Image (spheres, rainbow, N blue to C red):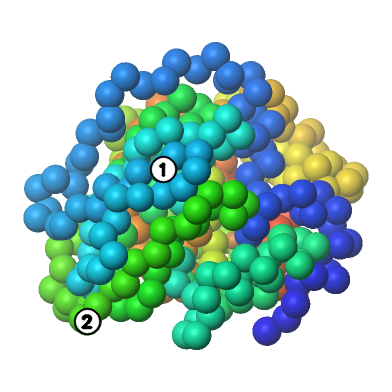
């Protein structure tokens, strides 16, 4: 276990980044989307036919509710709805299991003491993943499929600003759970994204996101100007981090967040609907690396794909 505390001070931009990860590109891009009209209706649930049990997480500016105190281990359809706070880019929460014997109060204290805002237990925490709504883009609900293994789980936000919700998962993970049909499998690892099966298409996708790495990762999907290359993304990240870009940086005012598939641990899968228009997209992960304190994106964890 390596403390990220001293290392991260070398990357000042991270000091203001929140608990575990930041989405600085999305936050910048959202300014010009402030007039986005909230969706009138909840998103359709493409997983309704699978026969999986459903959890309806309700988020308010104050906290989380809607998940029972005790659940059977298994695969769940997770819906997220409610009301975002004024500062919330995301309507949702991280669904986490801390190492045995670590209480949520300990983690909050670690985060408060750490200059980076990253608690020491972060890299030993299990993240279930799932899809929040992009409140900053006018979304009011989201749906995804996640696995909940036995143990004590918590729903919390990255800033510890909301009252967390805790629940217990009992029994054993069933061996024969239904698997959602995905048209694209996106694998994450150190430090890459790779489509390992199928492809992203115009219209609705069901994305199977799988973490083949050892660190937690997330996938932020953003629409970028046509013709943007991975070198243009790298240049923007280099410029963001104070370096000298080697190519033309992508213009942030032209970048539009499309989906945020939240932190997932090693070996964890999730399934999320993601609607895409034809265009060019970037994938990024901003989780901080424990060795260097650098965000994964800066270590190369960004990728560009084109939807015809
Ligand atoms: Cu990552």
Packing grade of label 2 (10 A; few <14, some 14-19, many >=20) is few
Q: Is residue 163 above or below residue 44?
A: below
101, 91: nearer the viewer:
101
Residue in the picture at 36% in, 21% down: 39
Do we see residue 207 in this rendering? no
Q: Which mark, residue 24?
A: none
CB of mark 2 near ligand 1 (< 8 Å): no
Judged from the image, the quadrant occupied by ligand 1 is bottom right
CA distance separating discs 2 and 1: 28 Å
Q: Quarter of the image holding residue 273?
A: top left
Q: Is residue 141 left or right of residue 123?
A: left
Residue 121 x/y as whole percent: 61, 76
Do we see residue 23 in this rendering? yes
Residue in the picture at 68% in, 71% down: 110
Q: Which residue is mark 1?
A: 59
Q: How many marks?
A: 2
Circle 2 — which element?
Answer: loop
Q: Which residue is mark 2?
A: 172
Circle 1 — which element?
Answer: strand
Q: Is residue 14 left or right of residue 200?
A: right
Residue 298 x/y as whole percent: 73, 55
């Amino acid at each position: 276990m390596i403390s990220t505390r001293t290392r991260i001070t070398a990357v000042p931009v991270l000091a203001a980044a929140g608990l575990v990860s930041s989405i600085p590109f999305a936050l910048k891009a959202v300014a010009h989307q402030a007039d986005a009209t909230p969706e009138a209706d909840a998103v359709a649930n493409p997983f309704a036919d699978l026969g999986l049990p459903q959890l309806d997480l309700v988020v308010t500016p104050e906290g989380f509710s809607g998940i029972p105190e005790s659940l059977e281990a298994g695969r769940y359809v997770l819906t997220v709805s409610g009301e975002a706070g004024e500062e919330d880019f995301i309507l949702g929460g991280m669904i986490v299991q801390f190492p045995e014997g670590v209480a949520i109060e300990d983690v909050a204290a670690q985060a408060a003491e750490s200059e980076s805002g990253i608690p020491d237990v972060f890299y030993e925490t299990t993240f279930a993943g799932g899809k929040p709504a992009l409140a900053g883009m006018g979304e009011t609900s989201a749906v995804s499929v996640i696995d909940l293994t036995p143990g004590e789980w918590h729903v919390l936000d990255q800033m510890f600003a909301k009252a967390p919700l805790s629940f217990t998962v009992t029994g054993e993970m069933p061996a024969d759970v239904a698997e959602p049909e995905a048209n694209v499998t996106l694998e994450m690892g150190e430090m890459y994204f790779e489509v390992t099966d199928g492809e992203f298409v115009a219209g609705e996708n069901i994305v199977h996101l799988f973490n083949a790495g050892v660190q937690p990762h997330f996938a932020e999907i953003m629409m970028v100007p046509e013709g943007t290359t991975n070198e243009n993304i790298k240049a923007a990240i280099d410029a963001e981090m104070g370096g000298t870009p080697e190519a033309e940086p992508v213009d942030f005012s032209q970048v539009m967040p499309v989906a945020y598939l939240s932190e997932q641990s090693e070996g964890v899968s999730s399934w999320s609907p993601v609607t895409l228009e034809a265009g060019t997209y970037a994938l990024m992960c901003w989780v901080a690396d424990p060795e260097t304190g650098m965000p994964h994106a800066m270590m190369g964890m960004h990728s560009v794909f084109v939807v015809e």
